[in-house]
Amino acid sequence: MEVRIALHDTKRKESFLAYPLALCDVFPESGRVYVGFSGSNGIRYYHNFHSTHDWNFRAFSEISRILDLVEIIGGFFIVIVIIIVLICKLVSREQPYTSVPVDDDEPCRRYSIEELVAATKNFDSSQKLGEGQFGSVYRGFVSRRSEACAGGSEVAVKKLRGSQEKHIFHRELKVIKKVQHKHIVRLLGWCEANEGVVMLVYELMPNGSLDKALFTPNADLVLSWTQRYTILLDVASALLYLHEEYEPPVIHRDIKSGNIMLDKDYRGKLGDFGLARLVNHNKDLKTTMPFGTFGYQAPKTLEGEFTDKSDVFAFGKVMLEIASGNRSSNCHWNGDNTSNWVKSDIEVRNFVDSRLGRNYDKTEAAVVIQLGLLCCDDEDIRRPTMRAIMSCLKTRKLTSLSADGSPTRKPAQYASSTSKPLLNK
């Protein structure tokens, strides 16, 4: 305890009275303690003027010491954590990110983000080939340094929009990385960067997608009937492979003309496996959400149920698009889930794309139209299998279809009673 006394406003530097006092021996251990000041000059009849310029009071206890120690240790721990995080980030930049295991004998490889940025000119808009539901596709050129083939090669880089689409990336990679078929777009590799960027690298299809070739108004690029029929055979063989020849079977779930790509010879290749599912024979194939693209969805898929016959339904829509030149999405549902534009122009000559004139095979056209209608049946069990479809397309005959998953009734039943036969003899 120190006391300083001075006249007026002058502050005394040295203490007038100093006495060490342990207040813990004076004040009780519990309860409130009041601290005040009083004084007198000892002269009667005169006013007393006393000013308290400042005072301070510090208390020391075991708890406060513990709290101080905790603050010091906590601050030290935070600094250590920050240092560890920074070290981990530096190390991760130098080491490859391997969240997706790829076997050495698999036909695809991991690309670095730097390779694909260089290949696509930093994903320049001039390199963009198209945009889909989950991301954009860019044309790129992979140089010899990063590609085994001499001189490098042109590729298509599918860049998903963000980290929220990682499940699409992993699903597509899981399904297609081991699939090998000449009419399925070949996966060359993948890229998963630390920043959350995910990409798939495919062989480039120089003639784009089937929907652009079919529906883009350009008289110089009208697909011939022979090209159209060959594309159907190509895609049918790919679906047959996925449904019956690959193990485990694969259901694509998004068959449409926009996902059928055309190579330099206008041969068809099936692409975009972002919604595909591997079939587990011991589980029901049901989801809580509908899937696919409007105009190609079988009725039960709107309830989250899907089978290989869901792909058959969508392929039927593609068959009708190829024959007619009309978009499936422009149609309206009716009781039989067949399009109004299908029923109104049921004759082959009225149904077939007018841009072809008479340059088409009537027999093949009738087979395509009737098969397409059969594939679009409401009931899964009444749709043909891909094996039956492939057989009919190869033989150019709509023969009696077996009962094991294939319909036996005639497709002419789809036509109204006033319609003429599909094939005029």
Image (tube, rainbow, N blue to C red):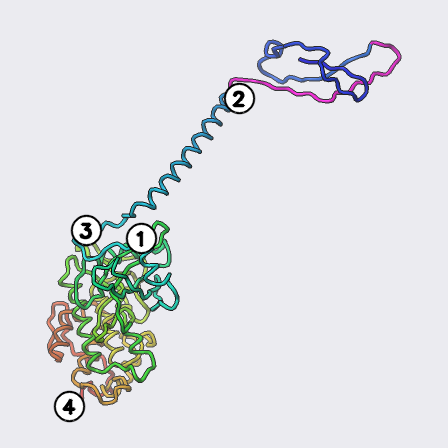
Residue 227 visible in the picture: yes
Circle 2 SS class = helix
The quarter of the displayed image where residue 111 is located: bottom left
Q: CA distance from mark 1 to mark 3?
A: 16 Å
Q: CA distance from mark 1 to mark 4?
A: 58 Å
Query: The residue under label 1 is which amino acid type?
Result: Glu
Question: Mark 1 or mark 4: which is in front?
Answer: 1
Circle 1 SS class = strand
Question: Mark 3 or mark 2: which is in front?
Answer: 3
Q: Residue under label 1, please give it.
A: 192
State whether residue 359 is above or below residue 390: below
Q: CA distance from mark 4 to mark 2?
A: 104 Å
Q: Residue under label 4, please give it.
A: 425
x then y, percent, for residue 222: 28, 82
Instruction: Report the residue at 14% width, 73% height from top.
Output: 390
Q: Earlier in the sequence, mark 3 or mark 2?
A: 2
The quarter of the displayed image where residue 254 is located: bottom left
Query: The residue under label 2 is which amino acid type?
Result: Ser
Look at the numbered discs 1 and 2 and tell me whether their residues touch, using CB distance below 8 Å. no
Q: Is residue 285 magenta?
A: no
Q: Is 31 on the left-hand or right-hand side of 321?
A: right
Q: 149 or 64: nearer the eye?
A: 149
Q: How many marks?
A: 4
Q: Which mark is residue 103?
A: 3
Query: The residue under label 3 is which amino acid type?
Result: Asp
Q: Earlier in the sequence, mark 4 or mark 2?
A: 2
Q: Which residues are magenta?
A: 42-62
Q: Residue under label 2, please give it.
A: 64
